[in-house]
Image (cartoon, rainbow, N blue to C red):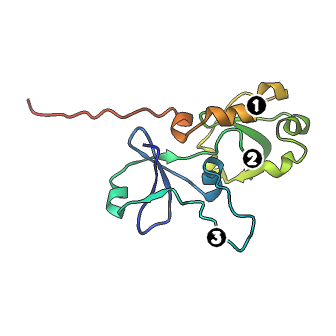
Amino acid sequence: AGDLIRGETYSSVYYYGDDGLRYVFPNEDVYLSWYQTECPASEDEFCDVFGDVIWLSDEAIASIQIGGNVTYKPGIKMLKINSDPTVYAVSRGSVLRPIDSEEVAEELYGERWNENIVDVPDSLFGNYEIGGSIELASQYDPDAEATDAYSIGSDRNLSAYTLVEITDQ
């Protein structure tokens, strides 16, 4: 549990959850919100942001049921969808909280707050729930949100699975 895995043939990377399911990273940006890797300053040097991924056979990957998509790590980015101008902060448990004003966004994410917004495709918006609005900066702390979501398993509140065996006796 907690490992990053992928198969031999396809490039998809998964998080292997405590519940025994695999969770899909829908894109590299979501992956990097959880696993930011320090890269060399030089653009000429290779940076392996997927260095901790464990390669499994395609058969082994196929035997692990998909549990859903991984969502952005809380506190790291603000999100919006293409069809709606509302900007959201991400809270624990894949909850999106609408930010009521540019002033609040600036207090939370700094002067260049608008460079910290990611457009999420409408098709991935269903991975999130809508929570209460953030009317004051004191109602949300990006650093605390990021710290509390120390792993994908903790953010999703995953727990170990129970094996149930049904027999004739």
User: Which class describes the residues within 10 Å of circle 1: few (<14), some (14-19), or many (20+)?
Assistant: some
Mark 1 against mark 3, which lies toward the viewer?
3
Q: Residue at x 69, y 30 (%)?
A: 131
The answer to whether 83 is drawn above or below residue 7 in the figure is: above
Q: Residue furthest bottom?
A: 44
At label 3, the amino acid type is Phe
Q: In this view, does 137 lie to the left or right of 17?
A: right
The CA span between labels 1 and 2 is 19 Å
The picture places residue 54, in percent across and down from the top left corner, at 44, 57
Residue 13 visible, this angle: yes
The CA span between labels 2 and 3 is 31 Å
The picture places residue 4, in percent across and down from the top left corner, at 48, 52
Q: Is residue 129 left or right of residue 137?
A: left
Q: Residue furthest left?
A: 169
Q: Which of marks 1 and 3 is nearer the N terminus?
A: 3
SS under mark 2: strand
- Residue where numbered disc 1 is placed: 141
Residue 91 visible, this angle: no
- Residue where numbered disc 3 is placed: 46
At label 1, the amino acid type is Asp
Mark 2 against mark 3, which lies toward the viewer?
3
Image quarter of residue 56: bottom left
Contact (CB < 8 A) between labels 1 and 2?
A: no
